[in-house]
Image: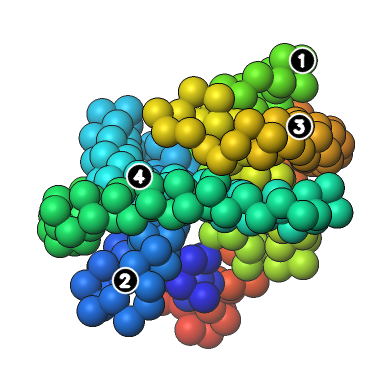
Protein backbone atom coordinates (compact mmCIF):
# COMPACT_ATOMS: atom_id res chain seq x y z
CA UNK A 1 0.00 0.00 0.00
CA UNK A 2 1.14 3.54 -0.68
CA UNK A 3 0.53 4.85 2.84
CA UNK A 4 2.88 2.58 4.74
CA UNK A 5 6.57 1.78 5.02
CA UNK A 6 8.15 -0.51 2.45
CA UNK A 7 10.87 -2.89 3.51
CA UNK A 8 13.05 -2.41 0.46
CA UNK A 9 13.32 1.37 0.88
CA UNK A 10 15.24 3.51 3.36
CA UNK A 11 13.31 5.66 5.81
CA UNK A 12 13.97 8.97 3.98
CA UNK A 13 12.86 7.40 0.69
CA UNK A 14 9.75 6.03 2.41
CA UNK A 15 8.87 9.42 3.87
CA UNK A 16 9.30 11.17 0.51
CA UNK A 17 7.35 8.46 -1.31
CA UNK A 18 4.45 8.52 1.14
CA UNK A 19 4.19 12.32 1.14
CA UNK A 20 4.37 12.56 -2.66
CA UNK A 21 1.82 9.77 -3.12
CA UNK A 22 -0.68 11.67 -0.98
CA UNK A 23 -0.04 14.85 -2.94
CA UNK A 24 -0.56 12.96 -6.18
CA UNK A 25 -3.76 11.41 -4.81
CA UNK A 26 -5.09 14.87 -3.91
CA UNK A 27 -4.15 16.24 -7.34
CA UNK A 28 -5.82 13.31 -9.07
CA UNK A 29 -9.05 14.10 -7.23
CA UNK A 30 -8.86 17.86 -7.76
CA UNK A 31 -7.87 17.67 -11.44
CA UNK A 32 -9.59 14.44 -12.42
CA UNK A 33 -12.53 15.98 -14.24
CA UNK A 34 -14.74 15.31 -11.21
CA UNK A 35 -15.63 11.78 -12.22
CA UNK A 36 -16.85 11.46 -8.63
CA UNK A 37 -19.25 13.90 -7.02
CA UNK A 38 -17.65 17.17 -6.00
CA UNK A 39 -18.39 16.38 -2.36
CA UNK A 40 -16.44 13.14 -2.72
CA UNK A 41 -13.55 15.03 -4.31
CA UNK A 42 -13.51 17.39 -1.32
CA UNK A 43 -13.55 14.44 1.10
CA UNK A 44 -10.72 12.54 -0.58
CA UNK A 45 -8.53 15.60 -1.13
CA UNK A 46 -8.91 16.70 2.49
CA UNK A 47 -8.04 13.20 3.69
CA UNK A 48 -4.83 13.22 1.66
CA UNK A 49 -3.85 16.62 3.07
CA UNK A 50 -4.46 15.38 6.62
CA UNK A 51 -2.29 12.35 5.96
CA UNK A 52 0.52 14.61 4.79
CA UNK A 53 0.23 16.60 8.02
CA UNK A 54 0.40 13.32 9.97
CA UNK A 55 3.67 12.50 8.17
CA UNK A 56 5.01 15.95 9.08
CA UNK A 57 4.19 15.36 12.74
CA UNK A 58 5.93 12.01 12.61
CA UNK A 59 9.24 13.57 11.53
CA UNK A 60 8.77 16.91 13.30
CA UNK A 61 11.54 16.47 15.91
CA UNK A 62 14.20 15.78 13.28
CA UNK A 63 13.26 18.27 10.53
CA UNK A 64 13.16 21.19 12.94
CA UNK A 65 10.36 23.46 14.10
CA UNK A 66 10.84 26.02 11.33
CA UNK A 67 10.44 23.50 8.51
CA UNK A 68 7.60 21.75 10.28
CA UNK A 69 5.60 24.93 10.84
CA UNK A 70 6.14 26.18 7.31
CA UNK A 71 4.91 22.97 5.71
CA UNK A 72 2.15 22.23 8.22
CA UNK A 73 0.71 25.75 7.89
CA UNK A 74 0.91 25.46 4.12
CA UNK A 75 -1.18 22.29 4.01
CA UNK A 76 -3.53 23.49 6.75
CA UNK A 77 -4.29 26.68 4.85
CA UNK A 78 -4.64 24.75 1.59
CA UNK A 79 -7.43 22.65 3.10
CA UNK A 80 -9.48 25.50 4.58
CA UNK A 81 -11.69 26.29 1.56
CA UNK A 82 -12.44 22.59 1.12
CA UNK A 83 -13.29 22.36 4.83
CA UNK A 84 -16.10 24.87 4.34
CA UNK A 85 -17.73 22.57 1.81
CA UNK A 86 -17.15 19.55 4.01
CA UNK A 87 -18.73 21.22 7.03
CA UNK A 88 -21.84 22.21 5.07
CA UNK A 89 -22.24 18.66 3.75
CA UNK A 90 -21.65 17.09 7.15
CA UNK A 91 -24.51 19.07 8.69
CA UNK A 92 -26.89 17.39 6.25
CA UNK A 93 -25.39 13.96 6.92
CA UNK A 94 -25.56 14.56 10.66
CA UNK A 95 -29.30 15.25 10.44
CA UNK A 96 -29.83 12.04 8.46
CA UNK A 97 -27.75 9.92 10.86
CA UNK A 98 -29.56 11.38 13.86
CA UNK A 99 -32.96 10.72 12.28
CA UNK A 100 -31.96 7.13 11.47
CA UNK A 101 -30.60 6.47 14.96
CA UNK A 102 -33.74 7.79 16.66
CA UNK A 103 -36.26 6.96 13.93
CA UNK A 104 -38.84 5.75 16.45
CA UNK A 105 -38.72 9.09 18.29
CA UNK A 106 -39.44 11.24 15.25
CA UNK A 107 -42.15 9.14 13.65
CA UNK A 108 -44.62 11.43 11.92
CA UNK A 109 -42.11 14.28 11.55
CA UNK A 110 -40.47 14.73 8.17
CA UNK A 111 -38.01 17.41 9.27
CA UNK A 112 -38.32 18.59 5.66
CA UNK A 113 -37.91 22.28 6.50
CA UNK A 114 -34.73 21.63 8.46
CA UNK A 115 -33.34 19.49 5.67
CA UNK A 116 -34.19 22.08 3.01
CA UNK A 117 -32.37 24.80 4.93
CA UNK A 118 -29.26 22.62 5.18
CA UNK A 119 -29.45 21.69 1.49
CA UNK A 120 -29.78 25.34 0.49
CA UNK A 121 -26.76 26.18 2.64
CA UNK A 122 -24.70 23.39 1.03
CA UNK A 123 -25.57 24.58 -2.47
CA UNK A 124 -24.64 28.14 -1.53
CA UNK A 125 -21.28 27.11 -0.07
CA UNK A 126 -20.48 24.90 -3.06
CA UNK A 127 -21.22 27.74 -5.47
CA UNK A 128 -19.13 30.28 -3.56
CA UNK A 129 -16.11 28.05 -2.83
CA UNK A 130 -15.98 25.67 -5.78
CA UNK A 131 -17.38 27.83 -8.58
CA UNK A 132 -16.73 31.47 -7.71
CA UNK A 133 -13.45 30.95 -5.83
CA UNK A 134 -12.43 28.05 -8.14
CA UNK A 135 -11.06 26.19 -5.13
CA UNK A 136 -10.09 22.98 -6.95
CA UNK A 137 -7.72 24.84 -9.29
CA UNK A 138 -6.26 26.94 -6.49
CA UNK A 139 -5.71 23.89 -4.30
CA UNK A 140 -4.05 22.02 -7.15
CA UNK A 141 -1.56 24.84 -7.74
CA UNK A 142 -0.78 25.00 -4.02
CA UNK A 143 -0.08 21.27 -3.80
CA UNK A 144 2.15 21.34 -6.89
CA UNK A 145 4.32 24.01 -5.27
CA UNK A 146 4.51 22.02 -2.03
CA UNK A 147 5.53 18.89 -3.92
CA UNK A 148 8.72 20.61 -5.08
CA UNK A 149 9.81 21.07 -1.45
CA UNK A 150 9.31 17.51 -0.18
CA UNK A 151 12.95 16.52 -0.52
CA UNK A 152 14.05 19.46 1.63
CA UNK A 153 12.09 18.30 4.68
CA UNK A 154 11.86 14.55 4.12
CA UNK A 155 15.58 13.79 3.99
CA UNK A 156 15.67 12.31 7.51
CA UNK A 157 18.25 9.91 9.01
CA UNK A 158 17.54 6.25 8.33
CA UNK A 159 17.05 5.47 12.02
CA UNK A 160 14.17 4.75 14.39
CA UNK A 161 14.67 8.04 16.22
CA UNK A 162 13.64 9.89 13.05
CA UNK A 163 10.07 8.75 13.62
CA UNK A 164 10.14 7.43 17.21
CA UNK A 165 10.26 10.86 18.84
CA UNK A 166 7.45 12.15 16.65
CA UNK A 167 5.30 9.11 17.41
CA UNK A 168 5.89 9.52 21.15
CA UNK A 169 4.96 13.20 20.93
CA UNK A 170 1.66 12.63 19.12
CA UNK A 171 0.73 9.72 21.43
CA UNK A 172 1.48 11.91 24.46
CA UNK A 173 -0.61 14.75 23.03
CA UNK A 174 -3.51 12.42 22.27
CA UNK A 175 -3.28 10.84 25.72
CA UNK A 176 -3.20 14.26 27.43
CA UNK A 177 -6.15 15.40 25.32
CA UNK A 178 -8.06 12.28 26.40
CA UNK A 179 -7.44 13.02 30.07
CA UNK A 180 -8.42 16.68 29.63
CA UNK A 181 -11.64 15.74 27.83
CA UNK A 182 -12.45 13.10 30.44
CA UNK A 183 -12.08 15.61 33.26
CA UNK A 184 -13.98 18.38 31.48
CA UNK A 185 -15.78 17.20 28.29
CA UNK A 186 -16.27 20.55 26.58
CA UNK A 187 -16.79 20.73 22.83
CA UNK A 188 -13.33 22.25 22.40
CA UNK A 189 -11.51 19.62 24.46
CA UNK A 190 -13.30 16.72 22.82
CA UNK A 191 -12.49 18.16 19.39
CA UNK A 192 -8.82 18.56 20.31
CA UNK A 193 -8.75 14.93 21.42
CA UNK A 194 -10.31 13.88 18.15
CA UNK A 195 -7.70 15.72 16.07
CA UNK A 196 -4.78 14.18 17.92
CA UNK A 197 -6.33 10.69 17.77
CA UNK A 198 -6.77 11.03 14.02
CA UNK A 199 -3.13 11.97 13.46
CA UNK A 200 -2.09 9.02 15.61
CA UNK A 201 -4.28 6.70 13.57
CA UNK A 202 -2.61 7.79 10.32
CA UNK A 203 0.85 7.38 11.82
CA UNK A 204 -0.01 3.85 12.90
CA UNK A 205 -1.11 3.10 9.34
CA UNK A 206 2.33 4.14 8.13
CA UNK A 207 3.97 1.79 10.64
CA UNK A 208 1.62 -1.13 9.97
CA UNK A 209 4.25 -3.38 8.26
CA UNK A 210 6.29 -3.52 11.48
CA UNK A 211 3.73 -5.97 12.91
CA UNK A 212 0.62 -5.92 10.69
CA UNK A 213 -1.83 -7.73 12.96
CA UNK A 214 -1.05 -5.79 16.14
CA UNK A 215 -0.61 -2.34 14.60
CA UNK A 216 -3.68 -2.70 12.39
CA UNK A 217 -5.65 -3.47 15.55
CA UNK A 218 -4.33 -0.27 17.15
CA UNK A 219 -5.02 1.76 14.01
CA UNK A 220 -8.60 0.44 13.85
CA UNK A 221 -9.19 1.41 17.48
CA UNK A 222 -7.79 4.89 16.85
CA UNK A 223 -10.00 5.13 13.76
CA UNK A 224 -13.07 4.14 15.75
CA UNK A 225 -12.17 6.69 18.39
CA UNK A 226 -11.89 9.37 15.71
CA UNK A 227 -15.29 8.42 14.28
CA UNK A 228 -17.00 8.63 17.67
CA UNK A 229 -15.46 11.99 18.49
CA UNK A 230 -16.06 13.26 14.96
CA UNK A 231 -19.76 12.42 15.15
CA UNK A 232 -19.92 14.07 18.56
CA UNK A 233 -18.32 17.26 17.22
CA UNK A 234 -20.62 17.37 14.19
CA UNK A 235 -23.63 17.09 16.49
CA UNK A 236 -22.27 19.87 18.71
CA UNK A 237 -21.92 22.18 15.69
CA UNK A 238 -25.41 21.23 14.47
CA UNK A 239 -26.81 22.00 17.93
CA UNK A 240 -25.19 25.42 17.94
CA UNK A 241 -26.59 26.24 14.51
CA UNK A 242 -30.08 25.17 15.55
CA UNK A 243 -29.87 27.61 18.44
CA UNK A 244 -27.93 30.53 16.99
CA UNK A 245 -28.14 30.03 13.22
CA UNK A 246 -28.97 33.03 11.01
CA UNK A 247 -31.93 31.18 9.50
CA UNK A 248 -34.81 29.36 11.22
CA UNK A 249 -34.64 25.56 11.11
CA UNK A 250 -38.15 24.16 10.90
CA UNK A 251 -40.83 24.85 13.46
CA UNK A 252 -40.28 25.12 17.18
CA UNK A 253 -41.40 21.52 17.76
CA UNK A 254 -38.83 20.15 15.29
CA UNK A 255 -36.05 22.14 16.91
CA UNK A 256 -36.94 21.02 20.42
CA UNK A 257 -36.97 17.37 19.42
CA UNK A 258 -33.70 17.67 17.53
CA UNK A 259 -31.97 19.42 20.44
CA UNK A 260 -33.12 16.71 22.84
CA UNK A 261 -31.97 13.91 20.53
CA UNK A 262 -28.62 15.61 19.88
CA UNK A 263 -27.93 15.75 23.62
CA UNK A 264 -28.88 12.10 24.06
CA UNK A 265 -26.76 10.96 21.14
CA UNK A 266 -23.76 13.02 22.23
CA UNK A 267 -23.93 11.44 25.68
CA UNK A 268 -23.87 7.98 24.09
CA UNK A 269 -20.95 8.82 21.81
CA UNK A 270 -18.89 10.44 24.56
CA UNK A 271 -19.39 7.52 26.93
CA UNK A 272 -18.25 5.03 24.28
CA UNK A 273 -15.28 7.22 23.33
CA UNK A 274 -14.13 7.61 26.93
CA UNK A 275 -14.35 3.86 27.54
CA UNK A 276 -12.32 3.18 24.41
CA UNK A 277 -9.84 5.92 25.31
CA UNK A 278 -9.36 4.47 28.78
CA UNK A 279 -8.27 1.18 27.23
CA UNK A 280 -6.29 2.63 24.33
CA UNK A 281 -4.26 5.14 26.35
CA UNK A 282 -3.51 2.86 29.28
CA UNK A 283 0.20 2.76 28.48
CA UNK A 284 2.54 5.65 29.16
CA UNK A 285 4.03 7.28 26.04
CA UNK A 286 7.53 5.86 26.53
CA UNK A 287 6.15 2.35 27.06
CA UNK A 288 3.94 2.62 23.99
CA UNK A 289 6.82 3.76 21.78
CA UNK A 290 9.24 1.23 23.27
CA UNK A 291 7.00 -1.57 21.99
CA UNK A 292 6.86 -0.04 18.52
CA UNK A 293 10.65 0.33 18.55
CA UNK A 294 10.92 -3.38 19.30
CA UNK A 295 8.68 -4.12 16.32
CA UNK A 296 10.87 -1.84 14.19
CA UNK A 297 14.08 -3.62 15.15
CA UNK A 298 12.64 -7.03 14.32
CA UNK A 299 11.13 -5.84 11.03
CA UNK A 300 14.21 -3.84 10.06
CA UNK A 301 16.43 -6.84 10.71
CA UNK A 302 14.28 -9.10 8.57
CA UNK A 303 13.83 -6.49 5.86
CA UNK A 304 17.52 -5.74 5.45
CA UNK A 305 19.57 -8.79 6.34
CA UNK A 306 23.33 -8.51 6.15
CA UNK A 307 24.82 -10.12 3.05
CA UNK A 308 26.42 -13.54 3.47
CA UNK A 309 30.04 -13.48 4.53
CA UNK A 310 31.32 -14.49 1.13
CA UNK A 311 29.63 -11.52 -0.54
CA UNK A 312 30.97 -8.86 1.80
CA UNK A 313 33.65 -6.61 0.42
CA UNK A 314 37.08 -7.20 1.86
CA UNK A 315 38.60 -4.19 3.59
CA UNK A 316 41.01 -2.15 1.52
CA UNK A 317 44.66 -2.96 2.10
Number of the front mark, 4 or 2: 4
Viewer-proximal residue among 23 and 113: 113
Residue 317 image position (x, y, % from top left): 32, 68
Residue carrying label 4: 84
- Please tell me which residue is depicted at 65% across the width and 44% down the height of the picture: 231
Viewer-proximal residue among 93 and 23: 93
- Please tell me which residue is depicted at 29% across the width and 31% down the height of the picture: 69
Residue 155 visible in the shown view: no
| Sequence-wise first label, 4 or 3 | 4
Query: Mark 1 to mark 4: distance in Å?
Result: 31 Å
Residue 216 visible in the shown view: yes
Q: Describe residue 140's horizontal placement relative to residue 12 as left or right.
A: left
Label 1 element class: helix
The tag on residue 165 is none
Query: Mark 3 to mark 1: distance in Å?
Result: 24 Å
The tag on residue 260 is 3
Amino acid sequence: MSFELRAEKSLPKNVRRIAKKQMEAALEELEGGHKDSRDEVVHEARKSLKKIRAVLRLVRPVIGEKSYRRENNWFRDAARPLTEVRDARILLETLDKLAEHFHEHIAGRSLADVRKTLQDNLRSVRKRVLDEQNAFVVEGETIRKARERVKSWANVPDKWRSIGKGLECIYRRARSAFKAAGADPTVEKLHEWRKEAKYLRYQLEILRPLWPQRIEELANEADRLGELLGDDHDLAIFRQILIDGPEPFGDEGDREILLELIDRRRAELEQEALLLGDRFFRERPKEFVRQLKGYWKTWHGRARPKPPEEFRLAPAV
